[in-house]
Amino acid sequence: MEKSKIPVFDNYTVTTLAGQAGVSGSNNGQGTEARFNKPYGVALDSSGNVYVADQNNHLIRKIDSSGNVTTLAGIAGVSGSINGQANAARFKEPTGVAVDSS
């Protein structure tokens, strides 16, 4: 997978949901304005939101059903292992995310 975008496969057609090929970063934003740095694990909730482990940014990101990307937890470029909410949490190269039905 390209290290700076999130592809979507639909009827064997690949489109970009968020990010831009060859352009790394940690910007939040709409669609191709957003930036990732090695998006790895993804999960989908029942509302159509996509959750992404942004590995090299040490972040957990959310792409809503409109394609808007926000950072849910962590601080870009700051690794660690701290439980907490939002920017108080720290991750070291996260590779997976999961959602539950609640």
Image (tube, grey):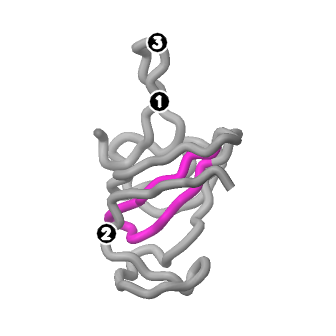
Give the alpha-carbon distance from disc 2 to disc 3, as whole Å. 32 Å
The residue nearer to you, when weighing 78 against 51, is 51
Indicate which disc, 2 or 3, sits on the residue closer to the N terminus.
3
Q: Amino acid at mark 1?
A: Val
Q: Which residue carries the number 3 mark?
A: 11
Q: Is residue 24 left or right of residue 63?
A: left
Count the marks: 3
Q: Which residue carries the number 1 mark?
A: 8
The correct choice, above or below, for 94 with respect to 99 in the image is below
Q: Position of residue 34 (x, y in %)?
A: 54, 52
Q: Amino acid at mark 3?
A: Asn
Q: Which residue carries the number 2 mark?
A: 93
Q: Position of residue 92 (x, y in %)?
A: 32, 75
Asked if the residues shown at circle 2 and circle 3 are in contact, with their CB atoms under 8 angstroms apart, the answer is no
Indicate which disc, 1 or 2, sits on the residue closer to the N terminus.
1
Give the alpha-carbon distance from disc 1 to disc 2, as whole Å. 23 Å
Q: Residues within 10 Å of mark 3 (few under 14, many from 20)?
A: few
Q: Residues within 10 Å of mark 1 (few under 14, many from 20)?
A: few
Q: Is residue 75 left or right of residue 85?
A: left
